Image (spheres, rainbow, N blue to C red):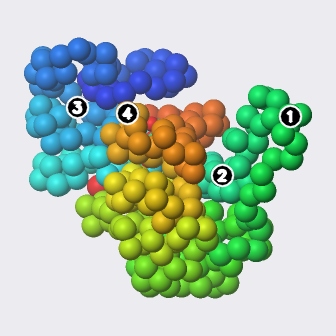
Amino acid sequence: MSKPVILQVGPYPEWDQKPLESAFEVKRLFEATDKAAFLGEHGPDVRAIATRGELGADRAMIAACPQLEVISVYGVGFDAVDLDACRARGIRVTNTPDVLTQDVADLGVAMMLCQSRGMIGAEGWVRDGSWVSKGLYPLKRRVFGRKAGILGLGRIGYEVGKRLAGFDMDIAYTDIAAKDYAPDWTYLADPLELAHHSDFLFVTLAASAETRHIVNHDMIEAVGPDGMIINISRASNIDEDALIAALQDGTLGSAALDVFEGEPALDPRFLEQDNVLLQPHHASGTIETRKAMGQLMRDNLSAHFAGQDLLTPVL
Ligand code: 8YV
């Protein structure tokens, strides 16, 4: 029996590539120089798309695959998949929630600690001989006991909060409603109020058209010159121009970012700022988690083609 044809949007580690290719006939879109021509040639045969969180599947890609049945996202975020186009054609969508939650939360908290304590600069201080020639490293800001805000108390936000509780932080959060699983933390319905509360504002909400630029100029100003914004969600949740301007003029103390508009080609103005920690969208990037994500991404495809229930359906 012939294998189902799938369109692979971006590369995966070798440990995913091999089993994917043994189960499916894989068309590697990411290797094509002329993507439109590639889609024109192979799209008519494609029954599934295997993609990544930040790459998704846009309307044109979906339209180029008239036999498309399912899109499997390697990642929890599915904001880059055109869900309306999928709904209109009854195309199923899956993602990889849960398996990455802990690692994403770990990196967010690590970014806060790293940036607040100036660890990147401190490393340079040792390596370039400043410790010997200039003496003590400049003093930085404490983390423990300060105020944290979590914008979006979903799975990842909750795990961030659990870690922050270990630093005796005063934790508040915003979500569409108060969460009964977070009785010790303060619920603030208004994101602006949350920003005023926060020395450290974690952006952990799932991105959508509705959340675009939810962290706007007013929110950034409210976090303030002693505050930090940590983004481990999607760049679109923050008005990046307003963020850069605030980092430049000191309206905002600092930021720690794992996601960027147009990544990996980020706005070059970020590179001129030493009050921002820049990370290459790797919050889920541990071997353990990426293996689990790859397995779940493939298991969803296999379940679909075996006529079984999808393990982690979005649509
Ligand atoms: C990426 C992510 O999928 O989970 C998400 O939504 O954006 C990430 O986990 C990962 O970087 C692999 O591309």
Upstream in sequence: badge 2 or badge 1? 2
Kindly tell me whether residue 57 is visible in this rendering.
yes
Residue 52 in the image: x percent, y percent? 39, 37
Measured Cα–Cα span from mark 4 to mark 3: 31 Å
Q: Quadrant of residue 291?
A: top right
Which residue type does callout 3 highlight?
Arg
Report the residue marked by disc 4: 265
Q: For the residue with label 1, is its CB less than 8 Å from the closest atom of ligand 1?
A: no
**Crowd around label 2: few <14 · some 14–19 · many ≥20 (10 Å):** many
Report the residue marked by disc 3: 47
**Crowd around label 3: few <14 · some 14–19 · many ≥20 (10 Å):** some
**Crowd around label 1: few <14 · some 14–19 · many ≥20 (10 Å):** few
Kindly tell me whether residue 90 is visible in this rendering.
no
Give 214 or 23, whichever is nearer the viewer: 214
Report the residue marked by disc 2: 115
Which residue type does callout 4 highlight?
Ala
Residue 67 in the image: x percent, y percent? 14, 34
Do the residues bearing badges 4 and 2 touch, measured as CB atoms within 8 Å?
no
Upstream in sequence: badge 4 or badge 3? 3
Upstream in sequence: badge 2 or badge 3? 3
Q: Is residue 233 left or right of residue 130?
A: left
Do the residues bearing badges 4 and 3 touch, measured as CB atoms within 8 Å?
no
Report the residue marked by disc 1: 133
